Amino acid sequence: MVTIEQKLSMFSKLLHRSMNDKFTEEMEKLRSEYAEKLAKNREEADSEAEDILRRSLKRAEAEKTEIASRSRINIKKAQMEVRERLFNTMLSRLTDRIRSFILSQEYGGYIASITKKLACAELTGSNLIILMTQADIDKHGELLKKELGEQQRELEFRVAGDDIIGGFIAIDTGSGIRMDFSIKTLLEDNHGYIMQELFRALDAGGAAAASNGSDR
C-alpha cells in the first residue's frame, strides 16, 4: 500500500520535473528569441555599416573624380600657358632673325620677288602708293621702280611704321585695292601654322622623352 508520504514524495518529484521541463522550455525559448534578435541586430548593423561604407565610397569616388577633373584642367591650363610662352619666345626670336635678314644682301632678292608678284596683279590705276620703312625706301626704292618700270605706273613712296618689319604695302589708287606684302602680315597669316609646327615638335619631344624614361 502506498502511503501518503510516498504519494507526496512522488507528487513533489513530478512537480519538480514539470518545473524543470518548463524552465528548460522557457530557457530554450529565451535562447531562441535572443539568437533571433541577435541575428536581426547583426544583420541591421551589417546593413547600416554597408550603407555607410557605400555612401562613403560614393562620396570618396565623387571627390576623387572632382579632384582628378580639377587636376586635368590645371595641367591643361599649365600646358597651354607654357606653350603660349614658348610660342611668344619663338616668335620673338624669329622676328629678331628676320630683322637680321633685312640687313643682309639677300633681302634685296626678297623685295624683288614680292615686287614681281605685285607686277603680275591686275591693277587699273596708273598710280601706286608704296608704304615701306624709311630704311627700305632709301635702300630698295630704286629696285621697285626698276621692277615696275615697264608698266608705266607712277610710284609714290610713303613711310610706314617699323611695325611692318619689312616688305611693303601697295595701294592701287585706281581701284583702291590694298595689297599687303609686309613681313608683319606674313607672320600673322602664318601664326596658326607656326604654332602647329611648334606644338608638333613639343609633342614629339615629349613622347621621345617619355619613351627614353620608360626604357630606363
Image (tube, helix red, strand yellow):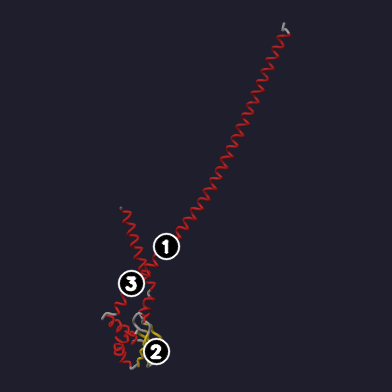
Q: Position of residue 47 (x, y in %)?
A: 57, 42
Q: Nearer the viewer, mark 3 or mark 2?
A: 3
- What secondary structure is marked by label 3? helix
Look at the picture and state if 145 lies above or below 12.
below
* Distance CA(mark 3)–CA(mark 2): 34 Å
Quarter of image, res 93: bottom left
Q: Residue furthest left?
A: 105
Residue at the location (35% across, 89% down)? 157
Number of other residues with Cα within 10 Å of mark 1, as a class: few under 14, some 14 to 19, many 20 or more: few
Say left or right for 130 vs 74. Answer: left
Q: Which residue is mark 3?
A: 93
Question: Do the numbered discs 1 and 2 sit on residues whose CB atoms are within 8 Å?
Answer: no
Residue at the location (58% across, 38% down)? 43
- Disc 3 residue type (three-letter): Arg
Say left or right for 29 vs 134. Answer: right
- Disc 2 residue type (three-letter): Asp
Q: Position of residue 16 (x, y in %)?
A: 67, 17
Quarter of image, res 102: bottom left
Q: Residue furthest right?
A: 4
The disc placed on residue 192 is none
Number of other residues with Cα within 10 Å of mark 3, as a class: few under 14, some 14 to 19, many 20 or more: few
Q: Earlier in the sequence, mark 1 or mark 2?
A: 1
Q: Which residue is mark 2?
A: 172
- What secondary structure is marked by label 2? strand
> Number of callouts in the render?
3
Q: Which residue is mark 1?
A: 78
Screen quadrant of the N terminus: top right
Look at the picture and state if 97 lies above or below 209.
below
Observer-nearest of 17 and 149? 149
